[in-house]
Amino acid sequence: MTAYTLPESPIQRLSDEAHPERCTPEQAAPRLQTITLFRDHPLLLDCGRPLSSVRVAYHTYGEAREDALLVTHALTGTSAVHEWWPTLFGPGKALDPRQAYIVCSNVLGGCAGTSGPRELDGTPLTLRDMVAVQRELLRVLGVRRVTVVGGSMGGMQVYEWLRSYPDLVERAVIIGAPARHSPWAIGLNTAQRNAIRLAPGGEGLKVARQIAMLSYRSPQSLGQTQSGESRRKPGVPAVETYLEYQGEKLAERFCEQSYCTLTEAMDRFSLSDAELNAIRTPVLVVGISSDVLYPSAEVQSFAALLPASSYWELHSPHGHDAFLMDAESLNDTVKEYLTARLGA
Protein backbone atom coordinates (compact mmCIF):
# COMPACT_ATOMS: atom_id res chain seq x y z
CA MET A 1 0.00 0.00 0.00
CA THR A 2 1.06 3.56 -0.57
CA ALA A 3 1.47 5.99 2.31
CA TYR A 4 -1.66 7.83 3.44
CA THR A 5 -1.84 11.61 3.44
CA LEU A 6 -3.99 12.95 6.23
CA PRO A 7 -5.04 16.48 7.14
CA GLU A 8 -3.10 18.44 9.74
CA SER A 9 -3.95 17.79 13.37
CA PRO A 10 -2.68 19.26 16.64
CA ILE A 11 -1.83 15.81 17.89
CA GLN A 12 1.04 13.68 16.55
CA ARG A 13 0.36 10.07 17.50
CA LEU A 14 1.55 6.53 17.15
CA SER A 15 4.94 7.39 15.62
CA ASP A 16 7.81 5.05 16.49
CA GLU A 17 10.30 7.71 15.50
CA ALA A 18 8.70 10.47 17.56
CA HIS A 19 7.95 8.42 20.69
CA PRO A 20 10.25 5.38 21.04
CA GLU A 21 9.40 3.26 24.08
CA ARG A 22 6.83 5.68 25.46
CA CYS A 23 6.17 3.48 28.47
CA THR A 24 7.69 0.62 30.40
CA PRO A 25 6.55 -3.02 30.01
CA GLU A 26 4.74 -2.66 33.34
CA GLN A 27 2.84 0.39 32.10
CA ALA A 28 1.98 -1.37 28.84
CA ALA A 29 0.51 -4.41 30.62
CA PRO A 30 -3.27 -4.88 30.39
CA ARG A 31 -5.29 -3.48 33.27
CA LEU A 32 -8.93 -4.49 33.78
CA GLN A 33 -10.82 -1.82 35.68
CA THR A 34 -14.41 -1.03 36.58
CA ILE A 35 -15.94 2.41 36.99
CA THR A 36 -19.43 3.78 37.62
CA LEU A 37 -20.41 6.58 35.26
CA PHE A 38 -23.36 8.98 35.15
CA ARG A 39 -23.62 9.31 38.93
CA ASP A 40 -24.31 13.04 38.89
CA HIS A 41 -26.08 13.35 35.56
CA PRO A 42 -28.07 10.62 33.80
CA LEU A 43 -27.49 9.22 30.35
CA LEU A 44 -30.58 9.84 28.26
CA LEU A 45 -31.02 6.71 26.18
CA ASP A 46 -32.38 6.89 22.64
CA CYS A 47 -35.62 5.31 23.88
CA GLY A 48 -36.13 8.31 26.20
CA ARG A 49 -35.25 6.62 29.48
CA PRO A 50 -32.70 8.34 31.73
CA LEU A 51 -30.09 5.92 33.04
CA SER A 52 -27.90 6.64 36.05
CA SER A 53 -24.97 4.85 37.72
CA VAL A 54 -23.80 2.86 34.71
CA ARG A 55 -21.10 0.33 35.57
CA VAL A 56 -18.41 -0.01 32.90
CA ALA A 57 -15.70 -2.67 32.72
CA TYR A 58 -12.73 -1.67 30.61
CA HIS A 59 -9.09 -2.38 29.83
CA THR A 60 -6.38 0.21 29.36
CA TYR A 61 -2.97 -0.43 27.89
CA GLY A 62 0.00 1.89 27.82
CA GLU A 63 0.71 5.29 29.30
CA ALA A 64 -2.36 7.47 29.93
CA ARG A 65 -2.50 10.59 27.79
CA GLU A 66 -4.98 12.99 26.21
CA ASP A 67 -5.04 11.16 22.88
CA ALA A 68 -6.13 7.54 22.87
CA LEU A 69 -6.71 4.62 20.56
CA LEU A 70 -10.17 3.22 21.29
CA VAL A 71 -10.87 -0.36 20.21
CA THR A 72 -14.55 -1.31 19.91
CA HIS A 73 -15.37 -5.01 20.17
CA ALA A 74 -17.69 -7.30 18.22
CA LEU A 75 -20.97 -8.90 19.34
CA THR A 76 -19.61 -11.50 21.75
CA GLY A 77 -16.29 -9.81 22.42
CA THR A 78 -14.90 -8.34 25.63
CA SER A 79 -12.67 -5.46 26.62
CA ALA A 80 -9.60 -7.78 26.69
CA VAL A 81 -8.19 -6.86 23.27
CA HIS A 82 -4.90 -8.64 24.01
CA GLU A 83 -6.79 -11.93 24.25
CA TRP A 84 -9.03 -11.83 21.17
CA TRP A 85 -6.89 -9.83 18.71
CA PRO A 86 -3.32 -11.05 19.27
CA THR A 87 -2.41 -10.66 15.58
CA LEU A 88 -2.94 -6.90 15.82
CA PHE A 89 -2.09 -6.31 19.49
CA GLY A 90 1.40 -6.09 20.93
CA PRO A 91 4.84 -4.53 20.49
CA GLY A 92 5.54 -3.62 16.90
CA LYS A 93 1.97 -4.35 15.81
CA ALA A 94 -0.89 -2.08 14.78
CA LEU A 95 -2.16 -1.80 18.36
CA ASP A 96 1.09 -1.21 20.22
CA PRO A 97 0.71 -0.28 23.90
CA ARG A 98 4.28 1.07 23.97
CA GLN A 99 3.29 3.75 21.48
CA ALA A 100 -0.40 4.41 22.15
CA TYR A 101 -2.77 4.70 25.06
CA ILE A 102 -5.24 1.95 24.16
CA VAL A 103 -8.72 1.72 25.71
CA CYS A 104 -11.45 -0.87 25.20
CA SER A 105 -14.65 -1.16 27.22
CA ASN A 106 -17.32 -3.83 27.33
CA VAL A 107 -20.44 -2.42 25.69
CA LEU A 108 -23.55 -1.32 27.53
CA GLY A 109 -25.93 -4.28 27.49
CA GLY A 110 -23.10 -6.81 27.32
CA CYS A 111 -22.25 -9.44 29.88
CA ALA A 112 -18.57 -8.97 30.64
CA GLY A 113 -18.73 -6.46 33.48
CA THR A 114 -20.64 -3.48 32.08
CA SER A 115 -24.28 -2.90 33.08
CA GLY A 116 -26.31 -5.57 31.31
CA PRO A 117 -29.92 -6.24 30.32
CA ARG A 118 -31.05 -7.50 33.73
CA GLU A 119 -30.05 -4.15 35.27
CA LEU A 120 -31.72 -2.32 32.39
CA ASP A 121 -35.03 -4.16 32.86
CA GLY A 122 -35.30 -5.01 29.19
CA THR A 123 -34.85 -1.42 28.03
CA PRO A 124 -34.01 -1.38 24.30
CA LEU A 125 -30.57 -0.03 23.46
CA THR A 126 -28.97 1.44 20.38
CA LEU A 127 -25.38 1.60 19.24
CA ARG A 128 -25.59 5.34 19.92
CA ASP A 129 -26.30 4.54 23.58
CA MET A 130 -23.25 2.25 23.73
CA VAL A 131 -21.02 4.87 22.12
CA ALA A 132 -22.31 7.57 24.49
CA VAL A 133 -21.07 5.44 27.41
CA GLN A 134 -17.69 5.04 25.73
CA ARG A 135 -17.53 8.81 25.22
CA GLU A 136 -18.20 9.44 28.91
CA LEU A 137 -15.55 6.90 29.90
CA LEU A 138 -12.95 8.65 27.75
CA ARG A 139 -13.97 12.02 29.21
CA VAL A 140 -13.42 10.72 32.74
CA LEU A 141 -10.06 9.26 31.66
CA GLY A 142 -9.02 12.69 30.40
CA VAL A 143 -8.99 11.77 26.71
CA ARG A 144 -9.59 14.68 24.33
CA ARG A 145 -8.82 13.13 20.94
CA VAL A 146 -9.35 9.57 19.81
CA THR A 147 -8.61 7.18 16.98
CA VAL A 148 -11.27 4.46 16.81
CA VAL A 149 -10.71 0.93 15.47
CA GLY A 150 -13.31 -1.83 15.32
CA GLY A 151 -14.50 -4.85 13.37
CA SER A 152 -18.00 -6.28 12.82
CA MET A 153 -20.30 -4.78 15.49
CA GLY A 154 -17.22 -2.88 16.61
CA GLY A 155 -16.99 -1.35 13.13
CA MET A 156 -20.62 -0.29 13.36
CA GLN A 157 -19.75 1.47 16.62
CA VAL A 158 -16.97 3.28 14.76
CA TYR A 159 -19.55 4.55 12.29
CA GLU A 160 -21.60 5.81 15.24
CA TRP A 161 -18.56 7.58 16.68
CA LEU A 162 -18.11 9.33 13.34
CA ARG A 163 -21.76 10.41 13.33
CA SER A 164 -22.10 11.41 16.99
CA TYR A 165 -18.66 12.80 17.87
CA PRO A 166 -16.89 13.80 14.64
CA ASP A 167 -14.93 16.62 16.29
CA LEU A 168 -13.29 14.17 18.72
CA VAL A 169 -12.22 11.52 16.21
CA GLU A 170 -8.85 12.05 14.55
CA ARG A 171 -9.10 9.03 12.27
CA ALA A 172 -10.87 5.70 12.18
CA VAL A 173 -10.62 2.11 10.95
CA ILE A 174 -13.79 0.17 10.10
CA ILE A 175 -13.34 -3.56 9.42
CA GLY A 176 -15.98 -5.84 7.92
CA ALA A 177 -18.92 -3.68 8.96
CA PRO A 178 -21.87 -1.91 7.30
CA ALA A 179 -23.24 1.56 7.91
CA ARG A 180 -26.71 0.02 8.18
CA HIS A 181 -27.97 -3.53 8.53
CA SER A 182 -29.25 -5.23 5.41
CA PRO A 183 -32.40 -7.40 5.30
CA TRP A 184 -30.03 -10.39 5.02
CA ALA A 185 -28.21 -9.50 8.26
CA ILE A 186 -31.47 -8.64 10.06
CA GLY A 187 -32.96 -11.93 8.92
CA LEU A 188 -30.05 -13.92 10.31
CA ASN A 189 -30.29 -12.10 13.65
CA THR A 190 -34.06 -12.62 13.74
CA ALA A 191 -33.64 -16.38 13.31
CA GLN A 192 -31.07 -16.42 16.10
CA ARG A 193 -33.29 -14.49 18.51
CA ASN A 194 -36.24 -16.75 17.67
CA ALA A 195 -34.14 -19.78 18.57
CA ILE A 196 -33.35 -18.20 21.95
CA ARG A 197 -36.98 -17.31 22.65
CA LEU A 198 -38.23 -20.75 21.67
CA ALA A 199 -35.68 -22.52 23.86
CA PRO A 200 -34.66 -20.20 26.72
CA GLY A 201 -32.19 -21.35 29.33
CA GLY A 202 -29.22 -21.93 27.06
CA GLU A 203 -30.30 -24.39 24.37
CA GLY A 204 -31.63 -21.64 22.12
CA LEU A 205 -28.42 -19.66 22.52
CA LYS A 206 -26.46 -22.69 21.34
CA VAL A 207 -28.56 -22.88 18.17
CA ALA A 208 -28.26 -19.12 17.67
CA ARG A 209 -24.51 -19.42 17.78
CA GLN A 210 -24.59 -22.24 15.24
CA ILE A 211 -26.58 -20.06 12.83
CA ALA A 212 -24.20 -17.19 13.43
CA MET A 213 -21.11 -19.32 12.83
CA LEU A 214 -22.38 -20.25 9.37
CA SER A 215 -22.50 -16.54 8.55
CA TYR A 216 -19.09 -15.89 10.11
CA ARG A 217 -17.37 -18.51 7.96
CA SER A 218 -17.64 -19.19 4.25
CA PRO A 219 -18.18 -22.30 2.12
CA GLN A 220 -14.47 -22.29 1.31
CA SER A 221 -13.50 -21.98 4.97
CA LEU A 222 -15.71 -24.85 6.11
CA GLY A 223 -14.54 -26.90 3.13
CA GLN A 224 -10.94 -26.43 4.23
CA THR A 225 -11.41 -26.91 7.96
CA GLN A 226 -14.50 -29.07 8.52
CA SER A 227 -14.63 -31.59 5.70
CA GLY A 228 -15.09 -35.28 6.28
CA GLU A 229 -15.83 -37.18 9.46
CA SER A 230 -15.65 -35.79 12.97
CA ARG A 231 -12.70 -36.87 15.09
CA ARG A 232 -14.86 -36.42 18.17
CA LYS A 233 -17.76 -38.55 16.95
CA PRO A 234 -16.88 -41.14 14.30
CA GLY A 235 -19.56 -41.42 11.65
CA VAL A 236 -20.77 -37.84 12.21
CA PRO A 237 -19.84 -34.99 9.81
CA ALA A 238 -17.09 -32.80 11.19
CA VAL A 239 -19.09 -29.63 10.59
CA GLU A 240 -21.89 -30.95 12.79
CA THR A 241 -19.71 -31.46 15.85
CA TYR A 242 -17.90 -28.19 15.09
CA LEU A 243 -21.16 -26.25 15.28
CA GLU A 244 -22.23 -28.10 18.41
CA TYR A 245 -18.93 -27.23 20.07
CA GLN A 246 -19.22 -23.56 19.11
CA GLY A 247 -22.73 -23.38 20.55
CA GLU A 248 -21.71 -25.04 23.81
CA LYS A 249 -18.67 -22.81 24.19
CA LEU A 250 -20.66 -19.60 23.81
CA ALA A 251 -23.44 -20.76 26.13
CA GLU A 252 -20.85 -21.20 28.88
CA ARG A 253 -19.70 -17.58 28.74
CA PHE A 254 -22.48 -15.43 27.28
CA CYS A 255 -25.90 -14.22 28.33
CA GLU A 256 -28.89 -14.85 26.07
CA GLN A 257 -30.52 -11.56 27.11
CA SER A 258 -27.36 -9.71 26.08
CA TYR A 259 -27.35 -11.57 22.78
CA CYS A 260 -30.90 -10.42 22.01
CA THR A 261 -30.31 -6.86 23.23
CA LEU A 262 -27.16 -6.38 21.18
CA THR A 263 -28.42 -7.98 17.97
CA GLU A 264 -31.59 -5.88 18.14
CA ALA A 265 -29.41 -2.76 18.48
CA MET A 266 -27.43 -3.83 15.41
CA ASP A 267 -30.62 -4.38 13.43
CA ARG A 268 -31.87 -0.86 14.26
CA PHE A 269 -28.57 0.75 13.30
CA SER A 270 -28.74 2.89 10.16
CA LEU A 271 -26.74 5.81 8.80
CA SER A 272 -28.27 7.58 5.81
CA ASP A 273 -26.30 8.41 2.69
CA ALA A 274 -26.48 12.07 3.67
CA GLU A 275 -24.99 11.33 7.10
CA LEU A 276 -22.17 9.34 5.50
CA ASN A 277 -21.48 12.16 3.05
CA ALA A 278 -21.20 14.60 5.97
CA ILE A 279 -18.37 12.65 7.67
CA ARG A 280 -15.06 14.41 6.98
CA THR A 281 -12.83 12.33 9.26
CA PRO A 282 -10.17 10.21 7.51
CA VAL A 283 -11.37 6.59 7.53
CA LEU A 284 -9.82 3.31 6.42
CA VAL A 285 -12.59 0.87 5.50
CA VAL A 286 -11.70 -2.81 5.18
CA GLY A 287 -13.81 -5.35 3.34
CA ILE A 288 -13.28 -9.12 3.42
CA SER A 289 -13.29 -10.96 0.10
CA SER A 290 -15.21 -14.05 1.28
CA ASP A 291 -17.52 -12.38 3.81
CA VAL A 292 -21.09 -13.65 3.38
CA LEU A 293 -22.51 -11.68 6.33
CA TYR A 294 -21.32 -8.26 5.15
CA PRO A 295 -20.17 -8.82 1.55
CA SER A 296 -17.15 -6.80 0.45
CA ALA A 297 -19.17 -5.05 -2.27
CA GLU A 298 -21.60 -3.80 0.39
CA VAL A 299 -18.80 -2.62 2.66
CA GLN A 300 -17.07 -0.88 -0.23
CA SER A 301 -20.28 0.85 -1.31
CA PHE A 302 -20.56 2.50 2.11
CA ALA A 303 -16.88 3.48 2.00
CA ALA A 304 -17.49 5.23 -1.31
CA LEU A 305 -19.96 7.56 0.42
CA LEU A 306 -17.35 8.77 2.93
CA PRO A 307 -15.53 11.81 1.51
CA ALA A 308 -12.20 11.04 3.23
CA SER A 309 -12.12 7.26 3.05
CA SER A 310 -9.66 4.70 1.75
CA TYR A 311 -10.80 1.15 0.97
CA TRP A 312 -8.71 -2.00 1.27
CA GLU A 313 -9.77 -5.62 0.92
CA LEU A 314 -8.56 -8.51 3.05
CA HIS A 315 -8.28 -11.56 0.80
CA SER A 316 -8.99 -14.70 2.77
CA PRO A 317 -11.12 -17.83 2.36
CA HIS A 318 -12.29 -17.68 5.98
CA GLY A 319 -15.27 -15.35 5.68
CA HIS A 320 -16.33 -12.63 8.08
CA ASP A 321 -14.12 -13.89 10.92
CA ALA A 322 -11.00 -13.53 8.76
CA PHE A 323 -10.31 -10.25 10.59
CA LEU A 324 -9.66 -12.42 13.66
CA MET A 325 -8.46 -15.69 12.08
CA ASP A 326 -6.34 -14.60 9.13
CA ALA A 327 -5.19 -11.13 10.02
CA GLU A 328 -1.45 -10.87 9.27
CA SER A 329 -1.90 -8.65 6.22
CA LEU A 330 -4.63 -6.74 8.04
CA ASN A 331 -2.17 -5.94 10.81
CA ASP A 332 0.32 -4.56 8.30
CA THR A 333 -2.32 -2.42 6.58
CA VAL A 334 -3.83 -1.01 9.77
CA LYS A 335 -0.39 -0.32 11.25
CA GLU A 336 0.64 1.58 8.12
CA TYR A 337 -2.56 3.62 8.23
CA LEU A 338 -2.29 4.46 11.92
CA THR A 339 1.38 5.36 11.80
CA ALA A 340 1.14 7.58 8.72
CA ARG A 341 2.37 11.03 9.62
CA LEU A 342 -0.39 13.57 10.00
CA GLY A 343 -0.22 16.35 7.49
CA ALA A 344 2.64 14.65 5.60
Image (cartoon, rainbow, N blue to C red):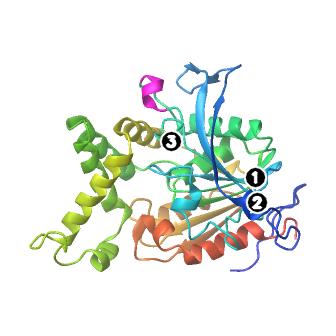
**Residue 31, percent from left and from top:** 65, 50
The one of 243 and 124 positioned closer to us in this rendering? 243
- In front: label 3 or label 1: 1
- Please tell me whether residue 211 belongs to the stretch shown in magenta: no
- In front: label 3 or label 2: 2
Q: Which residues are magenta?
A: 116-121
Q: Where on the picture, by quarter, is residue 86? A: bottom right
Q: Which residue is mark 1?
A: 68
| On screen, residue 296 above or below 150 | below
Q: Are marks 3 and 1 in contact (CB under 8 Å)?
A: no
Task: Give, as a three-letter code, the residue at label 3.
Answer: Phe
- Please tell me whether residue 120 belongs to the stretch shown in magenta: yes
Label 1: element kind: strand
Label the magenta part by its dominant secondary structure: helix
Residue drawn at (62%, 68%) of the image: 311
The residues tagged by marks 3 and 1 sit, at their Cα atoms, a distance apart of 25 Å
Instruction: Report the disc number at residue 100.
Output: 2
**Residue 222, percent from left and from top:** 29, 73
**Residue 278, percent from left and from top:** 70, 47
Task: Give, as a three-letter code, the residue at label 1.
Answer: Ala
Residue drawn at (41%, 38%) of the image: 258
The one of 122 and 83 positioned closer to us in this rendering? 83
